[in-house]
Image (cartoon, coloured by chain):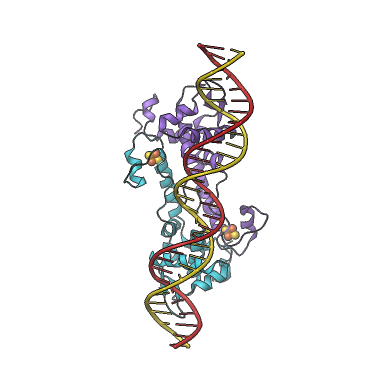
Chain colours: A cyan, B purple, C yellow, D red
Amino acid sequence: MLSMTKKTGYGLIAMIHLARLPEKKLASAREISDAYGISLSLMMNVLKKLCAAGYVESVRGSRGGYRMLRPAEEINFVGLMEALEGPMKLAECITRQVEGLGSEMACKLISQCPIANPIHRVNSRIREVLSGVTLAEIIEDTAGSRLQSKSQTQKA
Amino acid sequence: MLSMTKKTGYGLIAMIHLARLPEKKLASAREISDAYGISLSLMMNVLKKLCAAGYVESVRGSRGGYRMLRPAEEINFVGLMEALEGPMKLAECITRQVEGLGSEMACKLISQCPIANPIHRVNSRIREVLSGVTLAEIIEDTAGSRLQSKSQTQKA
DNA sequence: TTGAAATAGTATAAATAAGGTACTATATAA
DNA sequence: TTATATAGTACCTTATTTATACTATTTCAA
Ligand code: FES
Ligand code: FES
C-alpha cells in the first residue's frame, strides 16, 4: 500500500553505487550485488532495465559493467521508479471498468465516479514531490556517503 | 507500485456519501454499494473497519446503518487509508531482514544500508502531503458534489 | 413473537502482483 | 578459446489484494 517495490530499492542502490564511481569507471552487476548482499540475478535484472531506460550505459564482455550516463542532479526518484516499475498511478478505476481503454482515460469518461478528480489531484501532488527528489540529494542523505565523497564531511 | 488499494477507494466513496447526508442521518451498506455499483460485501467490510477505527458510528438492526462521527474537515487521506490498509511505509528493508524487529526499527539499526535515510525522508514528505488532503477538500473536488451541496455551485 | 433487515466478526477462496530464478545468446578481454 | 560479463526472455514461487461466505447478534415492525 503506497509503497515502492524492492526493484526500485535495488535500482536506487545501484545508481548510488555508480554515481560514486570516478568518471568513466565501470562497475559490474556482481560487484554491486556483492557490496550490498543483494542477489546477483536481481541486480542484473534491474541494471538491464536501467540500461534500456537510458540511465546507464553497459559494456559487455570480460571487464565489462555499467556506468552512469547522466549526472546525479538530473535524475529524480519518480523517473527512476517508473523506469523500473512502469508508470505510477495512485489508483485504478474503482467503480467500473471500461473495456478497451487505459484506466487513466476511463477515469475521465465516467462522470459519476466521485473520486476520479480527487485521486488524480493527489496523484499529481505525490508526483511533484517525488520528481523533486534527486539522486544527488539521496546520496547526500545516505549514511555511507561521506566514506567515499571528498567535500561534505560536515554535511551530517 | 505507489498505489492505494481499492479498499481505500471504497472507503473514500463511503465517507463522501456519508458526509453528504444531513446531520444524524444514516446510510446502510446496501444503500451506498447500490449507489456506486460496488459489491455489497466489500462495502460492508470497509464500513466495519471504518467503524472500528472510529470514523463512523453504526446502528444495528432493521433501519440501521452508518453515520459520520467527525466533520469532513478533520478527516485526512492518510488517516483514512491507514485505517483501512494498515500503517503506510514506502519500503520494507531492502538489503537485509533483521529477525524479531519491525522493519522500521530494523532500518535504523543497519548503518550500512545506503537508502534507509533517504527512504525515510521521502516517506515523511509523502505523508505530509497526504495528511494535508482532507475529506472536505476531496468532496469539493468531486464531480457530483454540486448536485447535492447548497453553496458552492460556482466552485468549478 | 416472529421475521426481515441490518451490522459484527471471522474465515476462506480466487485473482493479481511482486519477488526471485533459470536459461540461452552474444560480446569482449586476456 | 576460455572465462567473464551483459541481453533478453521465460518461468516459478510467494505474498498481497480482492472478493465471497457464513454464523451470530441486534433492532424494527408487522
Ligand atoms: S477511479 Fe476511475 S472512474 Fe472512479
Ligand atoms: S531499507 Fe531498511 S535497511 Fe535498507
Q: Nearer the viewer, residue B56 or B139?
A: B56
Where residue A4 appears, as percent x and y from the top left, is 50, 54
x 36%, y 46%: residue: A104
Does residue A85 appear left or right of residue B121 in this picture? Answer: left
| Number of marks drawn | 0
**Residue B115 occupies which quadrant of the picture?**
bottom right
**Residue A143 occupies which quadrant of the picture?**
bottom right
Q: Nearer the viewer, residue D5 or B135?
A: D5
Residue B89 shows up from this direction: yes
Q: Nearer the viewer, residue B139 or B17?
A: B17
Residue B75 shows up from this direction: no
Say above or below: A36 vs B64: below
Say above or below: A98 vs C17: above
x 37%, y 41%: residue: A97
x 43%, y 79%: residue: A61
Q: Nearer the viewer, residue A126 or A27?
A: A27
Q: Where the C terminus of chain A falls, by quadrant?
A: bottom right
